[in-house]
Image (tube, rainbow, N blue to C red):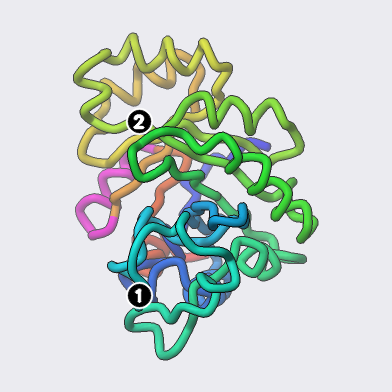
Amino acid sequence: MPFSARTAIVSHRGGAFLWPENSLDAFRESLALPIEQCECDVHLSADGVPVVIHDAVLERTTEGKGPVGAQDAAALAALRLRGASGSRLPLLSEVAALFQGRRQQLQVEVKTLRDGAPDRALVPRTLAALDGAGIRAQCRIISFDAPLVAEAAAAGGLAGTIWLFEAALLRRIGVAGVIGVARAHGFAMVETEIGTLDGALVEALRGAGLSIGVWGANHADSIGKALALGVDALATDDPVLALRLRGGA
């Protein structure tokens, strides 16, 4: 399913500048906006349940301690989020349920393990959670790990997949290398940080037939840059500002 000709706005971590990141409240608030997508992050609990949290450890965003993967889902789901008025750490199944019957898509970033290695159980467990809510077709799996993205794409039934690449990788392998990875894995869309993207990179990626997303467009200048470059999707921590700069609904 392609994006529209207009830049799609993606509420990054549910709009982390405006509401507690990756919280159910954040996704509820984001779903009330005329945006196209929301984004969340997932790790697996010790008993193999996808949990919505960015970090591989609990300290920054919850009142818990230690690795996410060291506790079972029941214990993780009982943890309160910091600064979230008693809200608790959500399971992916709970976030997915919010998207039932909604027009917005959900991007799910499948994270790597604490040592940076891919978690091979994460993609099938994530897809199972999305299937449980009946929303696989309105979801996109995204990751920095190209084989994980390829695995999700091969499973089928998704709205799409996105491979994320950082500036460090671009410096190491160059634009040709990035395009080569995308072609080798059959990716239709890639995404990078807004500070890395410029007109020349956009032209090269477009020339390779790739759709383009950015993350880190969180202020007026960076959001304006992304819109001016005509990216397909703009992941932002401030979706309200992005809507205003894009021109509303």
The quadrant the N terminus occupies is top right
Tell me if 213 is positioned left or right of 189 in this view.
left
Helix, strand or loop at mark 1:
loop
Assess whether residue 174 is covered by the magenta stretch: no
Compared to residue 153, the image places residue 94 above or below, namely below
Magenta span covers which residues?
218-230
Compared to residue 243, the image places residue 139 above or below, namely above
Compared to residue 42, the image places residue 238 above or below, namely below
Residue 226 figure quarter: top left
Front in this rendered view, residue 48 or 16: 48
* Residue drawn at the location 59% of the way across and 72% of the way down: 74
Assess whether residue 226 is covered by the magenta stretch: yes
- Residue 49 percent location from the top left of the image: 62, 57
Q: Is residue 244 visible in the rendered structure shown here?
A: no
Neighbourhood count class around disc 1 (C-alpha, 10 Å): few under 14, some 14–19, many 20 upward: some
* Residue drawn at the location 55% of the way across and 31% of the way down: 149
- Residue 106 percent location from the top left of the image: 59, 54
* Residue drawn at the location 40% of the way across and 78% of the way down: 81
Front in this rendered view, residue 200 or 84: 84
- Residue 159 percent location from the top left of the image: 67, 41
Compared to residue 224, the image places residue 231 above or below, namely above
Q: Is residue 108 visible in the rendered structure shown here?
A: yes
Residue 115 figure quarter: top left
> What's the residue type where badge 1 is placed?
Leu
> What's the residue type where badge 2 is placed?
Phe
* Residue drawn at the location 43% of the way across and 81% of the way down: 80
Residue topped by disc 2: 165
> Counting residues from the N terminus, which is met first, the one under dot 2 or under dot 1?
1
Residue topped by disc 1: 18
Tell me if 75 is positioned left or right of 195 in this view.
right
